[in-house]
Image (cartoon, coloured by chain):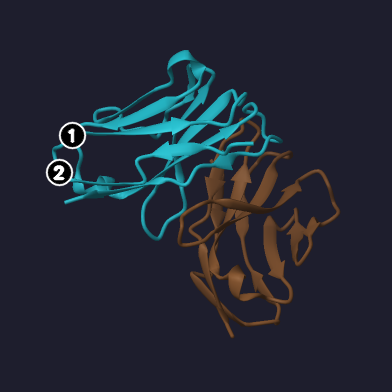
Chain colours: A cyan, B brown
Amino acid sequence: EAGVAQSPRYKIIEKRQSVAFWCNPISGHATLYWYQQILGQGPKLLIQFQNNGVVDDSQLPKDRFSAERLKGVDSTLKIQPAKLEDSAVYLCASSLTGGMSYEQYFGPGTRLTVT
Amino acid sequence: AQTVTQSQPEMSVQEAETVTLSCTYDTSESDYYLFWYKQPPSRQMILVIRQEAYKQQNATENRFSVNFQKAAKSFSLKISDSQLGDAAMYFCAYRNQGGKLIFGQGTELSVKP
């Protein structure tokens, strides 16, 4: 079974530029998550999708971050414009559904450096 | 709001010895899940062990076991017969009834040969 795929693996941009990350969840997984992990901290949930609908985006900085999950499969996370404090690893995860008993499977992450 | 606290930023253990990583959490929910994840330098999050709150029996996975104290809201991870490959960041995580995962700050474990 293929795992969660993410691209790119690394990205370096200058502040005020825009960037987009892509995630392909495990086939059949209805729930998709984006996490932000700043160096030295645990991951923080940015947004949760159930199929193509948003379940929780309470910690997404909506003035600069946006995310979509068209057709309930792949997802993209965009930052525009980027700030220095956005430097982090962005992790995508998926689960069969959103219930607490279902394991979340994580992708390898995208490491973003904003200079 | 639920919170997870890992009070040990770094831990060190001799190869083949046993080490315990601490985790406490705060919640008003009665049913939830607790997890320990391992994150090597590759940044891939790997599930180590999970505990369902309504189960009193502590979870065990090979060399990994937990000490779950629900009343004290404590969830420690014990690694027996430590191996060099166990060196990584370890995160304690709480999953609430809505399915949201809340992570602690992490403990960096080093294993000395």
Q: Is residue A58 above or below residue A53?
A: below
Which chain contains the residue that carries disc 2? A
Front one among B105 and A3:
A3
Quick check: marks 2 and 1 in contact, CB under 8 Å? Answer: yes
Q: Position of residue A64 (x, y in %)?
A: 24, 31
Residue at 30 percent across and 30 percent down: it is: A78
Say what amino acid the circle numbered 1 marks. Pro
Q: Quadrant of residue B83?
A: bottom right
Q: Position of residue A95 (x, y in %)?
A: 61, 32
Residue drawn at x 14%, y 45% is: A14
Image mark count: 2
Residue at the image point whose x is 71% and y is 36% from the top: A101
Amino acid type of the residue tagged 2 in the rendering: Lys
Which residue is most to the right?
B57
Secondary structure beneath label 1: loop
Tell me if mark 2 has few (under 14), some (14-19) or many (20+) residues whose alpha carbon lies within 10 angstroms of its own: some
Residue B62: percent from left, percent from top: 79, 63
Q: Quadrant location of residue B27?
A: top right
Question: Element type at marker 2?
Answer: loop
Q: Is residue B52 left or right of residue A2?
A: right
CA separation in Å, label 2 and label 1? 7 Å
Q: Nearer the viewer, residue A108 or A59?
A: A108
- Mark closer to the chain start, 2 or 1: 2
Q: Does any portion of residue A80 appear in the rendered image?
A: yes
Residue ID for mark 1: A81
Q: Which residue is mark 2?
A: A15
- The chain ID associated with circle 1 is A
Q: Is residue B40 left or right of residue A68?
A: right
If the image is split into quadrants, where does the N terminus of chain A sit? top right
